[in-house]
Image (cartoon, rainbow, N blue to C red):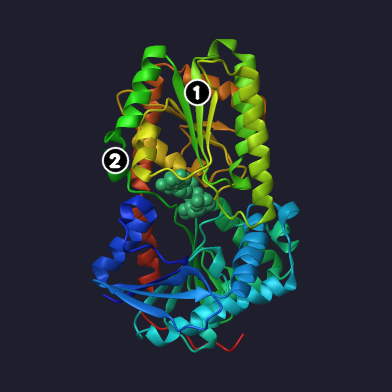
Amino acid sequence: MSRLVIVSNRIADLNNEPVQQGGLAVALVDALRERGGVWFGWNGEIGDRKEEAHVEQHGSITQISLSLTKKDYSEYYLGYANGVLWPLFHYRLDLVRYRSSHFSGYNRVNRKFAAALMPHLKFDDIIWAQDYHLITFARSLRNLGCRQRIGFFLHIPFPPPDLLAASSNHAELVQALMAYDVIGMQTFLDVNNFKRYLTDHTDAEVLENGDVRIGRRTIKVERFPIGMDVEAFGEMSQRITDDVAVDIKRREVLGRKQIIGVDRLDYSKGLPSRVKAFGRMLAKYPEMEKAVTFLQIAPPTREAVDAYSDIRDEMEALTGSVNGKYSDFNWTPIRYIHRSVPRNKLAALFRASQAGFVTPLRDGMNLVAKEYVAAQNPEAPGVLVLSQFAGAAEEMQEALIVNPYDIDEMADKLYAALTMPLNERKERHRALLEKIKRFDAKAWLVGFLKILEGGVEPVPKLPKV
Ligand code: GDG
C-alpha cells in the first residue's frame, strides 16, 4: 500500500489525544497509523528566523512542520486565506478585502510548502491536501517535478460561478486547482457550482461520467460529505462530568429546557440571527419565559481579521439586550460563553439539551449538527433545528430546516422543536442517526482515498504553469 501524505495548513497535534481534537483528526491519524505516512503543515509558530522543516517521528507517522514568517502569516493566512477566500467562498463578497500583495504571499507560502515537502516524497506516495489554504499547492509541487497523485478536499462551500468570477484572480485560482487529480467537495451544490464555473469560464470539458477533461488530463471532481465518529462521540456524551450533572438536575427540578449552539465565533455561522430568533420566540410565546435557556458556546477565532471583532461586538450587544429585557433574579435566558469548552463536556452538554440550534448563513458541512444528533439519547432525543444553507442539510432533511434570514420562521421552528411530541422526536432522530452513521468520518476518508488511489499511472509530466 502506498504511503499517504496529508498536507494541511496546521498540523494535527499528535502529542495530544486526537479524540479531543475531533472526528476528523481521529480519522486522518488512524489512516496514517494504519498505512504509515506523513502529516505536513505549519506548526503554528510565527518567527522570522529562517528554519528548515522540522521532522518528528510518531510511530508510523512522520510529522513534518515548518513555521511562518510574520509576512507569511499576515499575507497568506490572514490576508488572502481568511480575508479573501473564506468570505468569498461563503458568498460574502461584501467582506472580501483583496490586496494583490496578499495573493502573492499566498502563492509564495504554497511554493514554500511544496519546496519543503518535495525532498521527503517517495515516488509512489499519494498526497492529499486539505482545504482552501492550499488551492495553489499542487501547481507548486508540479512545477518542482512532482508526478505523484495529488488530491484536494475543500472543507468550505464552493461559490456559484458568477460570484467567484467577481473576485480578482479567479481564473488563476481555478487553473491552479486543475493541477490536482482528485477534487473533493462537501455537497452536490458545491460540485455543481464548480463544474458550472468550468463550463462557463474555462476550456475544460465536463464529461458524461462527471469527470473533467482539461488538455490531456482527466480530473475527478466528486462529493464526499464529511462526517464524524458517531459511536465514539455518542459514548463520550454519556460520561457526564459532575458540573454538567448538577446543572441537569437543577433544570429538571425547575422544568427548564435547554437550547444549545456551538460554533467558532465566525460571521458565517449566523449567530446574530440565532440570538434574534431566540428573543423573537420569547416575545411570541410568553410561556417559554423561564421555561428554557439558550446556551451558546462561541470560542474566539481569527480575531486579527476585522470582520471577526465586529461580530464579537454584535453578539455581546445582542445577548446583552435579550438578557436585559427578559432576565430575572432566578433566570438568565442566554448563557453566552466566549471560550473553548473541552470536547467531552461539549458532548455531555449536547446530550443534556432539548434542541440543537445550528443556523449558518453558509457552511461547507457543519459537524456540530452531526455531533448534536450523535450525542442524543435515542429514547428521549432532542430536536435539531438546522439552516438550509449548511451542507449538512443536503442529507439531514429530518431536522427542522430553517431559513436563517427569516427570524420569524426560526422562532416558530424553535418553539416547535421544544414542544415536539416524543414519538416524532424519536422518528426524526432515528432517521438522522442512520444517515450520519452512513456518512461518517471513516466513509469520507475511505471514499476519497479509493478514488485518489484509483489511478495507478503517474500523471503525465506537466508544462510549467
Ligand atoms: C470547517 C467548515 C466543515 C466548536 N467549538 C468548540 C469545539 N468546536 C468543534 C465542534 C466541531 C468543530 O469544532 C467545528 O466544526 P464545524 O464543521 O461545525 O465548522 P468549522 O470549524 O467551520 O469547519 C465546516 C468542517 O470544516 C469539516 O469539513 O463541516 O463546514 O467550515 O467539531 O464541536 N470543540 C471544542 N470546544 C469548543 O469550544 N472542544
The label number, if any, that marks residue 236 in the structure image: 2
In the displayed structure, would residue 70 be above or below residue 409? Answer: below
| SS category of the residue bearing label 2 | helix
* Quarter that holds the C terminus: bottom right
At a point 43% along the width and 81% down the height, the residue shown is 53
Q: Position of residue 370 (x, y in %)?
A: 42, 41
What residue sits 38% from the left and 43% below the top? Answer: 436
The residue carrying mark 2 has its beta carbon less than 8 Å from ligand 1: no
Up/down of 355 relative to 301, above or below? above
Percent coordinates x, y for residue 374 in the rendering: 35, 38
Q: Which residue is mark 1?
A: 293
Kindly give the residue lying farthest to the top in the view shown: 287
- Asked whether 269 or 438 is in front, the reply is 269
Where residue 359 sits, quadrant-wise, is top right
- Identify residue type, mark 2: Met
Judged left or right of residue 134, residue 374 is left
Residue 421 versus residue 47 in the image, above or below: above
Q: Position of residue 451 (x, y in %)?
A: 39, 67
Residue 406 can be seen, yes or no: yes
Quadrant for the N terminus, please.
Answer: bottom left
Assign a secondary structure to mark 1: strand
Residue lying at 44% horizontally and 20% vertically, measured from the top left:
257
Up-down: is 373 above or below 92? above
Q: Is residue 340 left or right of residue 23?
A: right
The circle drawn on residue 431 is none
Crowd tier of the residue under label 2, counting other residues whose Cα lies within 10 Å: few below 14, some 14–19, many 20 or above: many
Identify the image quadrant of residue 285: top right
